[in-house]
Amino acid sequence: EPQPGTALAERALAALRRVFSYQSFRGSQLDIIVAACSGKDTFTVQATGSGKSLCYQLPSLIHPHTVTLVISPLISLMEDQVAKLSQLGVPACMISSQQSDSDRKQAERGAMQGEYAIVYVTPERITLERWLYNFAQSLLTNKGQKDRRYLLSLIAVDEAHCVSEWGHDFRPHYRLLGNLRSNLPSSHPEVAMMALTATATPRVRQEIVEELGLRNPDVWVGSFDRRNLFYEVRRKNNRGDLVSTVRKGAEKDDEQDGLQGWERGSTVIYCSTRDETVQLAALLSHNGIPALPYHAGLSASDRATTQRAFAFSKCRVVVATVAFGMGIDKADVRLVVHWGLAKAVEQYYQQTGRAGRDGLFSKCILFYDNTDLSRAMGLAGSDGARVAALFEDFRRYTSFGGCRRKYLLEYFGEEVEWTDCNGMCDSCAASAAAATTSVGSAHQVPLGPSHRDLAAHAYLLLCSVQATGGRYGMRVPIDLLQGAKTKKVETAVGGRIVPVAGKGNRVISGMWDFVFSELQSKGFILTNPNNFSKFTTTYSVSAAGRKYIDKFTESGAAVAVLKDPPP
Ligand code: ADP
């Protein structure tokens, strides 16, 4: 364990103050820098905004003749960092295949001649045959020249989760980074590797270490808990919800100064299609909240204009696809809205992580409806088992009745001792509110806050499981609901008239699978202990499930549902 006070640590601190004008290191920055400067491999998993970049920017500023290569897939982030470093007087450049030939050649020549302390390079470029060899070799020839750098001493791989198919942003070129060090000239001194990412589940972490070939790395995993962010999931009613939500921003109460919530910070709205970004931006603008769309189909200059307008708060609201946000570094994003579902927990967490970088109270609100759900399930399903599994974890987040923060943190492998986040998510806020009112739980709709409007689906499916005598697996009751006339359905029904038969035919079957698993997790459908079938697990309706059917019938809702089944 390096102690502050060692010579290396002191030089690091001096460089931090001299170059960046920061007074002290944050979190594990110093430990990581000292380890990297001592030639160790390091792996840093820390939340966005925690200051990871500094960990790879500082080492070559401590040792005068060394060079750090930074591999990143995000061109705009690299451009940003090169510009900032140049302003601070740090010689840095960027090399990518997307530059014009002459720009790239110029940067490459300068880099090889040891003019730059930090060289940003894309994975496509660095994995070109012999690129790294030539680079390190030509650097070495500068040895002995005054003010020239000659030793490649650190290779930092930013966004390291891109190496993993289980991450949210797999990039095939990252797979080629594994044997980077074996591409160096054989006489080259040791080069340390540093991997960094803001999101990685334990599974992804393992893959990163293996794929990048890190050697016995020192690992720092910071907490993912963003305590100033409030998480909420809501069902969509109509687009008016979006307008009122954005208008209010992250405000808890009405403030007195005449400003509306959205005027007090910035808002990012994520939706899934390009058309939708345009429509929603128009809708908001029409309602007095100027908003711009952002998606990958816009021209580069339009995108740059929007990004700039957002960065300088000329436009406070951007409606975007996933294309927006790579490298957004805006401190006062008060609200991140997802209008529709994300693909996976990682992606969702990454996007919500753009809220509240300044540490102030901010909200992350996810809206979705059944159409979003069936669409997302369909898309995920058609993309193979892995994508479907990742989506299923996210789907579970939306229907989860407990603390959302706990769910997210545990997803990233963090051990969480508490069960309640002090009212900083909708579930915990609701249970705090319930505890202070006299309305007992008997009045609560048993499907939990986010699924009130699945009440009809739940009723239909429970009736169908009952009608099939509780002797089958999932398929038969769902087939019955959908009006399929299979042999098994006919045997199960045995000529009786079943009122719910065919009432589920407007709902896609994936949706019924989902409702089924919900009902299981709520304890309304149970696995039969003495199974009726040798081949499948069979289910029946529990006492709680029967009570649900009764209450639904008594309230008069059942008649309405049978007359007008859910879409
Ligand atoms: P990450 O890469 O982890 O998302 P960044 O490296 O972009 O985070 O850092 C987030 C912000 O924190 C940046 O504005 C950076 O300048 C600032 N920062 C980093 N380290 C320090 C420090 N030791 N003291 C003060 N500010 C810091």
Image: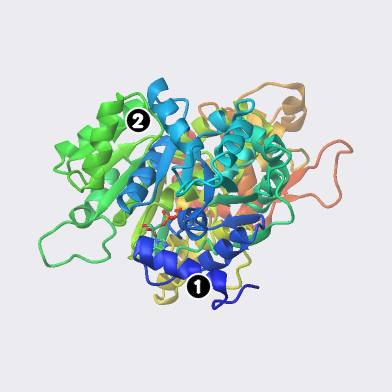
Q: Where 241 sits versus 97, above or below?
A: below
Q: Earlier in the sequence, mark 1 or mark 2?
A: 1
Way the structure is coloured = rainbow
Question: Is 208 placed left or right of 308 in the picture?
Answer: right
* Residue lying at 62% horizontally and 39% vertically, measured from the top left: 163
Question: Is 115 placed left or right of 263 in the picture?
Answer: right
Q: Foreground residue, 428 or 163?
A: 163
Residue 449: image location, x then y, percent: 46, 56
User: Can you say which quadrant of the picture contains the N terminus?
Assistant: bottom right
- Identify the residue under disc 1: 10
Residue 400: image location, x then y, percent: 55, 55
- Identify the residue under disc 2: 295
* Residue lying at 43% horizontally and 69% vertically, measured from the top left: 14
Identify residue type, mark 1: Glu
Rendered image: mark on residue 384:
none
Ligand 1 is located in which of the four quadrants? bottom left
Label 1 Cα neighbours within 10 Å, binned few <14 / some 14-19 / many ≥20: some
Occupied quadrant, residue 133: top right
Residue 376 visible to an observer of this rendering: yes
Residue 270: image location, x then y, percent: 37, 40
Q: Where 313 sits versus 502, above or below?
A: below
